[in-house]
Amino acid sequence: MSRSIKTKTLRIILCLLMAIALLPLISNTAEAAERREEFVVTKGPQDAAFTYTGTHFEITGDDGGDQDGVFITPEKTMTVASTDGTVITKLVMTRSYYTADGTLADKGTVTVSGNTITVTGINDTSVTISHADGDGFYKYVQINNVKVYYEDDDILAENITLDSESLELEEGDTAVISATVTPDNATYTVANITWKSSDESVATVDQNGKVTAVGEGEADISATITNGSDYTDDDVTVTCKVTVKNLVVISNIELKIDAPVGGDKVTADHSDPDDPDSPYNWLTQNPKPKVTSLNNDVELTQIQGEKIALWLNEEEGVFAGTFVGGKKYRVMGVIQPKEGYKIADEFKLTINGTEVTDFYSNAPGMVLFTYTVTAVKNNPPYIVPDTSVK
């Protein structure tokens, strides 16, 4: 290979290496975001100086006008100025009275379209608005809204993700909604989220996302990031629907369990080949124990239904076979209240007139219990004597 070819090759390689080295700098260069502050200038005082102060800007002038907005004439001006060095790129003003034609600015270019007056190309920290001289009303303009546009290098939040899209709570309960903001390097983070409830008679929320259930109903809990300005086009908002229930509390539970009858049969198809004697093959036992709720104030879910009651033998496995009169059998069941009710943290359970303490709650709103019953002895069949035999 000739020396010239080698030199060209080395130059190409060096250029590629330099380009690769510059990639992080290029990719991390954030495009300036257009932002906005908006002022509603309708407070007066008429024929006197006025001042409106925002986050980055302040508007001052000679005539506060009336409810239709501030007055701008050849002699009375309005100045928009930065309070922190932020550069103004554009103004958009709304004419409320008199004529927009003839509006002047000491910087940038003024255009008028209907009631909208736009000043572009300002690129300075202040701009003063006045009006050309004219006949009668044609030398005035009244402004009631001023939008001040600017740019900054903030990395805007693009999305908020909540760990819950919906919550079901009881009155008095609390829950914390956790939020995540993306991108990870956004200038405005979780700490900048504003939390709000659509109905504080149902649920309230503090600025840490903690929700408190107040009364029965539904409310939307919203999380909003304004990205540091009142320019709502770049706001990010997500919601979580909260349903609050006022449940009736059950403090006494009375059950009746029918004893099995000797000679009756129970089948249990142990379909789990890895654990054929598991007491949790509840779907396959037939018939299950007959358990009846005696509560007058509430109808409990039928606990003799699928998956929530079964016969156990002495070894605590699922019973299958023929009941023997006089022998004891255990019933295991789960109590679940119907919708709109809940079991108290401390309650009394009575079965067949006897208070039972052998139970525990293994899941919210559920109680698992066991109870021993004795199989009824089956009566032998009545044999009619044969009177024909002498």
Image (spheres, rainbow, N blue to C red):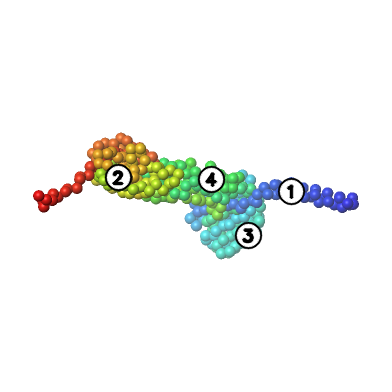
Instruction: Spot the residue most to the left.
Output: 390
Looking at the rendered structure, the kind of residue marked 2 is Thr
Looking at the rendered structure, the kind of residue marked 1 is Ile
Mark 1 or mark 2: whose residue is earlier in sequence: 1
| The label number, if any, that marks residue 322 in the structure image | 2
In this view, the residue in front, 312 or 128, is 312
Mark 3 or mark 2: whose residue is earlier in sequence: 3
What's the distance in space between the residues labelled 1 and 4, CA to CA?
A: 33 Å
- Marks 1 and 3 close (CB-CB < 8 Å): no
- Marks 1 and 4 close (CB-CB < 8 Å): no
What's the distance in space between the residues labelled 3 and 2, CA to CA?
A: 98 Å
Question: Is 131 rendered above or below residue 329?
Answer: below
Q: Quadrant of residue 332?
A: top left
| The label number, if any, that marks residue 299 in the structure image | none
What's the distance in space between the residues labelled 3 and 4, CA to CA?
A: 43 Å
Residue lying at 52% horizontally and 53% vertically, measured from the top left:
40
Q: Quadrant of residue 211?
A: top left
Q: Position of residue 74 (x, y in %)?
A: 60, 57
Q: Position of residue 337 (x, y in %)?
A: 32, 46
What residue is disc 4 on?
180
Residue lying at 57% horizontally and 61% vertically, measured from the top left:
116
Q: Residues within 10 Å of mark 1 (few under 14, many from 20)?
A: few
| The label number, if any, that marks residue 20 in the structure image | 1
The label nearer to you, 1 versus 3, is 1
Mark 3 or mark 4: whose residue is earlier in sequence: 3
Residue lying at 30% horizontally and 45% vertically, measured from the top left:
322
Instruction: Spot the residue most to the front.
Output: 390
What residue is disc 3 on?
110
Q: Quadrant of residue 353?
A: top left
- Marks 1 and 2 close (CB-CB < 8 Å): no
Looking at the rendered structure, the kind of residue marked 3 is Val
